[in-house]
Each structure stands twice: as structure tokens, then as C-alpha cells.
Image (cartoon, helix red, strand yellow):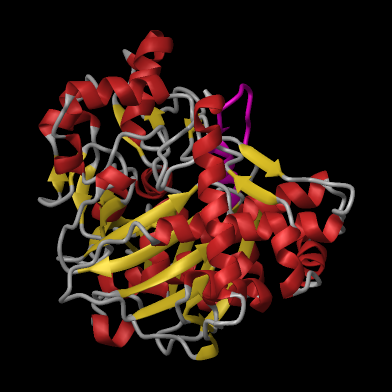
Amino acid sequence: MYLGLDLGTSELKALLLADDHRIVGVARAPLTVDRPHPLWSEQAPAQWWQALEAVVAELRTTHAKALVQVRAIGLSGQMHGATLLDAEGDVLRPAILWNDGRSGAQCEALTRAVPRLGEIAGNLAMPGFTAPKLLWVREHEPEVFVRVARVLLPKDWLRFMLSGEAVSEMSDAAGTLWLDVGARDWSDELLAATGLTRDHMPRLVESSEVSTLLKPELAARWGLRDGVKIAGGAGDNAASAVGMGLVDPGQGFVSLGTSGVVFVSTDRFLPNPAQAMHAFCHALPRRWHQMSVMLSAASAVSWAVKTFKFADEAALLEAAASVALADRARCPLFLPYLSGERSPHNNPNAQGVLFGLTHAHGPAEIAYAVVEGVSLGLRDGFDTLRLPADMPLREVALVGGGARSVWWGQLLADIFQVELTLYAGSETGGALGAARLAWLADGGAVAEVCTLPPVKQTLKPSSEGADGHRTRHARFQVLYMALRDQFR
């Protein structure tokens, strides 16, 4: 039995996985985000621990016999967050999250300081990454910065609490801008540019390796056996890929979560920073991946639900689906940049726009515009993928909470003009991937563990309306370029 823990932005999820691939139990605990100032996004790490205690308590109530059989724990989580600890291991301030946009000026300073940044880290400096956050803290909270003894990513702080050891792994570390992604090691040059050294960093392991052991006192309190291993784990998207069995070159997915992601596995380091494409280590040795990220995907739909008084997300999607194909051309256009944007614009100042409203537009047209706008933003990210000729795109899955809507999935297939596959259990991706990494750390073989789930549905792109989608996408891109300078 294996326990996967996925520390998301809006919830912490725990999943029990048997070694015959059965998902035995799942527990969730909600999380909240604090936004005390414009562009800020923070969480108190103590909230993460409370959520972890809650899900373990639930599993102990509902699946005590399975919990005592757990041999290893895997960790997955939101990437890039800066969790700052002092020399005693105490948290110095709320964690600065992946969707925090305050460090734009620090990104520019880091780019000037290290001209080789993209070559080493495989990525442009963006406010979402961890390193610019530390530059911001050094400039605006110097009394905090001088006390920083360790910087941990969110899931790695949970590991620290679970084991007492500071350890990270390649996939999550690749999103800090401190890792030499090709070499899979910390970069002294990048660390020095932010006033840090290797002493501030956790020890590195591969995602599928044993990183440490669970504290005996926690094992006793939670009803687990002694000597439970903790795998390296992975950043949320790499873990989702493992959970879906998408680990071979050319396999990938589109994720409709809080953020929107286009992800493809590779067998080599293929940076493309010029278009804000991320090149990260994958969750298996000698594997990397390309990834585009838009900051508001399903979260833009949630915003529209509250703003336009839909009953829930399902009601908004039903309204959007009611707009006939022939009527879509007259709908407003929606720029989904409610939290700034990463790929392909790298613009923390980008904003959401609902353009072209008239008296003829009602809730259904607005609902369609929002869902379409997210889909067109994802298409922009998809177009930044640069795979070599010997590594064709073989398979694209659709994952995340938004994947529950077959209508939205079909719209994406039509806009991308790519076949999308819906797999059973795709909504458990990060937690399932974490559990599978625990299985690998316990001696499981990749071919045995990282299997593809059963196919629920295949969404083939339709040629009907393809010209209309291309026209809308072109207008979407022109609108952003026309407004880009106004966002500053």
C-alpha cells in the first residue's frame, strides 16, 4: 500500500494506492489563499500541516487497515512557492506562491545579473519562480532575509515536517531558477545572484528515490508502521504525468486546473525560453519535459461563476455549450489573464478583458467567451512546444477538474486540432503520481508502476467550425498585442 499526498493551491489531497493499482481511498482538505495586496498570493504553511492532519485523520477513520499497510509515502505539490525557515527550522513569513506577481522588477534584475539564465535554468525569469521572490524579500523585507537559513518548496516543507530533513527533488527544484536543469544540480552562479549558497538549499534526490523516513512518533500517532519511506516526489505536473503513465518521450497532457498547462515528456533538455516555454526535469531519471503554463484556467471559470451569478461551474459550462456553432463568431472575446500570464507572454501585468459586448449578449455568450478564452490561451501555449523531428507528439491526455466537461474537452480538441484522450481517474493525477513515485521508491519497476489508465473517451478534432476557431484565435492574439502596453 502506498500513500500519495498532493499539496495543491485550493486543497490537499491524500490517496491510498494498492500494489494492484486500485485506488483504495481518497481524502481532501480545503486550503485558502491570502491576497493582502495587488499581485500578492500567499499561504501560511501551518495551514498545510492542518490540512495534512485532517486527511490522515479521515483516512484513519475510513481506511485504518489500509493505512497500517503503507510502506512508502510520495509527495506532490504546487511548484515555485518560497517557504522561508530560520536556523531553528521555524517559518519566517507566509509562503509566497506560484501565482504571486510582485517580483517583476526583480526578474529584470536577475536577467541582467545572469545573462546565461535561460541556458542554465532552461527558463526565463518570471515572478512565479522562486528565485525572484527571494530577491524581493531581500529588497523589501531585509530583516527577514538575513534570518533565512533554508528555502523550501511547499511539498518539501511538508517533508521537513514529516521527517525533520530538508530534501527536494529534480522536477520541483527545476522550477526555482536555482537549478542547472541539464546537469540536475544546484547552480552556484544562480544562487549567488540571489545572495544565497548551497547551504540554503535542501539536499537533492531523484523523484523515484527514497529521500528520508517518516518520523517514528508520527507513524505511531497516525497508525502507520515504523520505517515508512518517503519518496522524492515531484512537482504537481510531473507527478500528474506519472499518475497518468505519461513518462515516455512525446507523451503529454493538457491540464484544466486552477492554472492551465500543456506538458510533454522528452528524453533530453530542450529549453525554449524565448517563448516563455518551461524546460524542467521530469520525475524519472534521464527524463525532462517541456511545459507551457497559463495562470488562470479553471480559476477564470470560477471567477465568472461568481461574477455573473451562475449557480456553479456546471451551470456556466451548460450555458456556454448552448451557444450554437454558427453564433460563436458574434460572442465577445475574453483575455483570461486575471493573474497576469506566463506562457507565451511572460507578463505579470497582463489583465483580463471582456471585449466586444453589446446589448445582444447575455449570460450564455459571456460564458462561452470565458471558456473559449481559456482554451485559446492554452492553444498559444501549445504552439510554443518545440519537439525535434525524432520525437513526435504521440499522445495528449486531458486532465484536471475541467476535464470532467466533455463539451469543454471537445472544444479544446477542435481549437488545438489534436486528438485528446480522457483517461479514467485523471482527476486524481497529482496524488496518484505521488503514490506511484512512492511505489517506485519501494522497489517497483517503471513498466509495472507507470501504466496508462483505461481510456474513457477519445475526443477527435472536428473540421466543422475550424475556420471560425482560427479566425477567433487570430483576433484573440491581435487583441492582446493591442492592449499589452496598456496593462503596465
Q: Is residue 279 left or right of residue 115?
A: right
Residue range in magenta is 33-52
Magenta-colored stretch includes residue 41: yes
Magenta-colored stretch includes residue 223: no
Q: Is residue 259 left or right of residue 408?
A: left
Q: Residue at x 50, y 86 (%)?
A: 22
The image shows residue 3, relative to residue 271, as above or below, that is below
Q: For residue 118, which quarter of the picture?
A: top left
Residue 315 appears in the picture as rendered: yes
Of residue 183 and residue 84, the one placed in the foreground of this image is: 183
The image shows residue 367, relative to residue 414, as above or below, that is above
Location of residue 194 in the rendering, given as x and y in whole percent from the top left corner: 24, 22
**On-image quarter of the N terminus:** bottom left
Q: Residue at x 85, y 53 (%)?
A: 361
Of residue 188 and residue 202, the one placed in the foreground of this image is: 188
The image shows residue 409, relative to residue 470, as above or below, that is below
The image shows residue 211, relative to residue 412, as above or below, that is above
Residue 167 appears in the picture as rendered: no
Q: For residue 131, which quarter of the picture?
A: top left
Location of residue 483 in the rendering, given as x and y in whole percent from the top left corner: 56, 33
